[in-house]
Image (tube, rainbow, N blue to C red):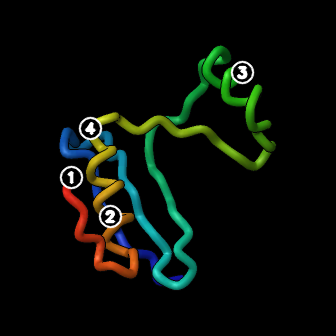
Amino acid sequence: MALRFRCIDPGTTGNECPSFSEDDETGDMFFQGGTVTDPKILGGIAEHSPIASDESVVRLPARMRPLILKALLEGQDDGGSAAL
């Protein structure tokens, strides 16, 4: 596996580090963030997509959205030259 770090939460203080990494070989994505345990959130998600016993729901801050989008677009054939 050739895991490549793509971005980290710009609000990171050192103790909490939400991040996004990607496997260069497969394109699989890995998200590090806070584990969601709120039954209402988990129930709402499970209504549309059941959560398997080997799956987790992870919360990432909204401020990471443009960083993740930029990282994903950089991997596209057109060079990812999208305005963010």
- The image shows a total of numbered marks equal to 4
Q: Nearer the viewer, mark 1 or mark 2?
A: 1
Label 4 vs label 2: CA separation?
14 Å
Q: Is residue 37 above or below residue 14?
A: above
The residue carrying mark 3 is 43
Image position of 42 (left or right of 65) = right
Residue lying at 34% horizontally and 66% vertically, measured from the top left = 73
Image position of 71 (left or right of 14) = right
Image position of 11 (left or right of 1) = left
Q: Residues within 10 Å of mark 4 (few under 14, many from 20)?
A: few
Q: Nearer the viewer, mark 2 or mark 3?
A: 2
Residue lying at 53% horizontally and 39% vertically, measured from the top left = 58
Place of residue 29 in the rendered image (x, y in percent of width and height, measured from the top left): 51, 63
Say what amino acid the circle numbered 1 marks: Leu
Which label was assigned to residue 84?
1
Labels 2 and 3: the sequence-earlier one: 3
Labels 4 and 1: the sequence-earlier one: 4
Do the numbered discs 4 and 2 sit on residues whose CB atoms are within 8 Å? no
Q: Nearer the viewer, residue 76 or 4?
A: 76
Label 4 vs label 3: CA separation?
25 Å
Residue lying at 80% horizontally and 43% vertically, measured from the top left = 53
Label 2 vs label 3: CA separation?
30 Å
Q: Residues within 10 Å of mark 3 (few under 14, many from 20)?
A: few
Q: Secondary structure at mark 3?
A: helix
Label 1 vs label 2: CA separation?
11 Å
Say what amino acid the circle numbered 2 marks: Ala
Labels 4 and 3: the sequence-earlier one: 3
Residue lying at 32% horizontally and 64% vertically, measured from the top left = 71
Which label was assigned to residue 71?
2
Q: Is residue 63 above or below residue 6?
A: above
Labels 1 and 2: the sequence-earlier one: 2
Labels 1 and 3: the sequence-earlier one: 3
